[in-house]
Image (spheres, grey):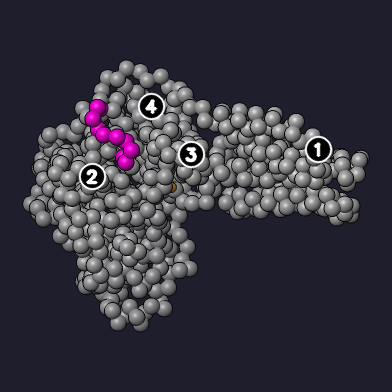
């Protein structure tokens, strides 16, 4: 059974437990002896089932059961045992209050963790205890009338609750003593010259509002770079220097450029409030970095990114290997192999319309059979997309810009692309038609090679990919040496438990997306020293998918059986535990966040910070910095 199903079963059993304990209490209060006995026995049975379910769930990781083991189960087992003993020895009338107690104990054991998420602390436990006790007193007063000694007991219960709440509100000490700052982020700039043989590629991007027209004619009021969304594709050849001048015409909340998946020097990273101040209307910022990673990447604003990226402030960044034959370096599409049909396909949802580039419907292409094709799919949305290729077998040659080792032929399997992720597919054009489908929907954004509108309709039945399994990238391709692996000695070991709960986000209390029970900026930094080998375990206790993304470093997924997987964004689905590792070789202060950008704005953001590196003055308030 999957961890998520176990979590669901546990929740169901727990709710049945609440129902049976409270049912027994109500039956006892109305003097129905047989019903009380029956319900109490059922409640005991259900509680024992829950203990067993939690036992199995514990095998999936302590993070999934912590609050159940330290709080919920002991409480309901203890109070339930008292109730059953009283019922057995002193009869139904005497058991009313203990049975209510067991019911309310079971109830807070379920509700309190749902409300505040992982981990359950002492303060939360005390406060929850007080709520259960208060509810029991109320029930007592209700059933026994003014004779009940509830007034006397009320004061200790209130004190218990206040102590609990107080402990919860106590500011967590940041722990790590900040050593001396030797470098400020703004000093960590990119180089001013390209690598030997490379050239300088200059781009100018002006952020402004514009209405864009999708291929079907639909108008979208977008936020754009240079009037188009996606923005201009930035291309270069390995070794070039990329220089981008960003200006802002009329995006009032400000903009930046973040090079997603590109491990640029920290000051070029475009994280407002951390590496620079957001560029406000009339402002300007120049980014410079070496094109030293080949592959498919993208750029996007990082200021109020949940809104900015959704509205269109993004574009592709593609770096190709330097051609061996120097003459082939055509400026229009640097490094492109003239024979290959090389297409960059950002998948984006504008106003609810899924697009491939700017195509919201069927896009047709005619290519001579036999010619090689490379499709670079980029998911610029906040939720995953499924991509399927019909009519040919293909290879997944790269993921997140990194070439896979000996990728095998794929046919009849779909690819899941996490928010922010990229896959590069490669195949020679066959004699028949080929279709690239997004989310199994041939009627929406679809790319046809050597097919036409008519064939789209005719073959709609044959392009039904809904039942295709998902290609398992963890076992795809063949192993190859990596600089470190699951058995390496790690200098740092971090765990991020993703959940939902009440937390402060930018000082505002909300039902937040939390990491280890806290929201931005109260999640402690991951502190590393340059050179450290770092392992990170990411656990998803929630019922939503969290595409985890670390800036400035590509992480190696530990425990793969196929090609090494170096990713910058990986989907941690509900109940999943991911172990990844990286070398801390890019000093700075880096964002580390969920790339469901709405989740990020609801608190799911922290920093990876290097010892000795400090934030510069005047980068602006971090308030809108994610
Ligand atoms: Cu693609 Cu912090 O982002
Ligand atoms: Cu998330």
Question: What separation in Å lies between label 2 and label 1 (alpha carbons)?
Answer: 63 Å
| Left or right of residue 518, residue 566 in this image | left
Residue at mark 1 to residue at mark 4: CA–CA distance: 59 Å
Could you say which is closer to the camera, residue 268 or residue 112? 112
Q: Distance between the residues labelled 2 and 4?
A: 31 Å
Foreground mark, 1 or 3, reads 1
**Residue at the extreme top of the image, as rendered:** 180
User: Is residue 437 inside the magenta stretch?
Assistant: no
Q: Which of 447 and 108 is in front in this view?
A: 108
**Residue 528 disc label:** 4
Q: Give the range drawn in magenta.
A: 616-625
For the residues marked 2 and 3, what is the alpha-carbon distance in whole angstroms?
27 Å
Badge 2 marks a residue whose secondary structure is: loop
Residue at 42% in and 66% down: 412
Q: Can residue 236 be seen in this view?
A: no
Left or right, 262 with reference to 197: right
Residue 624 located within the stretch drawn in magenta: yes
Which mark identifies residue 503?
Answer: 3
Looking at the rendered structure, which numbered label has been put on residue 254? 2
Mark nearer the N terminus (3 vs 4): 3
């Amino acid at each position: 059974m999957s961890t998520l199903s176990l979590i669901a079963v546990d929740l169901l059993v727990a709710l049945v437990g609440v129902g049976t304990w409270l049912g027994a209490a109500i039956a006892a209060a109305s003097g129905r002896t047989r019903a009380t006995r029956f319900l109490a026995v059922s409640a005991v049975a259900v509680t024992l089932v829950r203990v067993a379910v939690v036992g199995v769930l514990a095998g999936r990781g302590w993070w999934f059961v912590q609050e159940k083991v330290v709080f919920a189960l002991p409480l309901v087992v203890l109070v339930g045992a008292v109730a059953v003993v009283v019922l057995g020895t002193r009869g139904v009338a005497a058991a009313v209050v203990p049975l209510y107690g067991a019911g309310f104990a079971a109830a807070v054991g379920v509700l309190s963790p749902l409300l505040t998420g992982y981990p359950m602390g002492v303060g939360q436990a005390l406060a929850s205890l007080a709520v259960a006790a208060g509810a029991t007193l109320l029930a007592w007063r209700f059933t026994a009338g003014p004779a009940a000694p509830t007034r006397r007991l009320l004061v200790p219960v209130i004190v218990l609750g206040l102590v609990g709440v107080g402990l919860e509100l106590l500011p967590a000490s940041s722990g790590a003593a900040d050593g001396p700052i030797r470098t400020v982020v703004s000093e960590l700039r990119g180089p001013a010259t390209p690598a030997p043989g490379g050239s300088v590629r200059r781009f100018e991007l002006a952020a402004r509002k514009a209405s864009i027209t999708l291929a079907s004619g639909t108008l979208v009021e977008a936020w754009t770079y240079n009037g188009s969304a996606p923005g201009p594709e930035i291309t270069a050849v390995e070794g070039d220097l990329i220089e981008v001048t960003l200006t802002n015409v009329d995006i009032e909340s400000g903009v930046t450029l973040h090079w997603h998946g590109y491990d640029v020097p920290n000051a070029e990273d475009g994280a407002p409030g951390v590496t620079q101040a957001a560029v406000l209307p009339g402002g300007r910022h120049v980014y410079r970095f070496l094109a030293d990673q080949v592959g498919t990447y993208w750029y996007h604003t990082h200021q109020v990114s949940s809104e900015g990226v959704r509205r269109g402030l993004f574009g592709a960044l593609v770096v190709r290997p330097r051609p061996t034959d120097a003459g082939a370096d055509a400026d229009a599409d640097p490094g492109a192999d003239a024979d290959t049909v090389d297409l960059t396909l950002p998948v984006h949802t504008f106003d609810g319309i899924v697009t491939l580039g700017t195509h919201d419907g069927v896009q047709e292409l005619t290519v001579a059979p036999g010619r090689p094709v490379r499709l670079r799919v980029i998911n610029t949305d906040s939720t995953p997309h499924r991509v399927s290729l019909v009519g040919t077998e293909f290879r997944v040659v790269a993921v997140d810009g990194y070439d896979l080792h000996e990728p095998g032929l794929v046919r009849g399997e779909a690819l899941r692309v996490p928010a922010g992720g990229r896959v590069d597919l490669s195949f020679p054009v066959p004699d028949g038609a080929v279709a690239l489908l997004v989310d199994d929907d041939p009627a929406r954004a679809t790319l046809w090679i050597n097919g036409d509108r008519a064939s789209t309709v005719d073959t709609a039945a044959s392009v039904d990919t809904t039942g295709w399994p998902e290609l398992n990238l963890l076992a795809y391709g063949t192993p190859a040496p990596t600089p470190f692996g699951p058995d390496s000695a790690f200098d740092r070991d971090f765990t991020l438990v993703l959940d939902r709960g009440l937390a402060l986000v930018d000082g505002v209390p909300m039902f937040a997306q939390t990491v280890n029970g806290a929201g931005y900026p109260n999640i402690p930094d991951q502190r590393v020293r340059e050179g450290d080998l770092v392992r990170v375990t990411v656990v998803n206790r929630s019922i939503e998918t969290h595409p985890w993304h670390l800036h400035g470093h590509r992480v190696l997924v530990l425990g793969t059986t196929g090609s090494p997987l170096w990713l910058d964004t990986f989907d941690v689905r509900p109940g999943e535990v991911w172990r990844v590792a990286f070398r801390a070789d890019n000093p700075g202060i880096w964002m580390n966040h969920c790339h469901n950008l709405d989740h990020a704005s609801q608190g799911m953001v922290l920093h990876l910070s290097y010892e000795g590196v400090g934030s510069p003055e005047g980068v602006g308030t971090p308030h809108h910095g994610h």
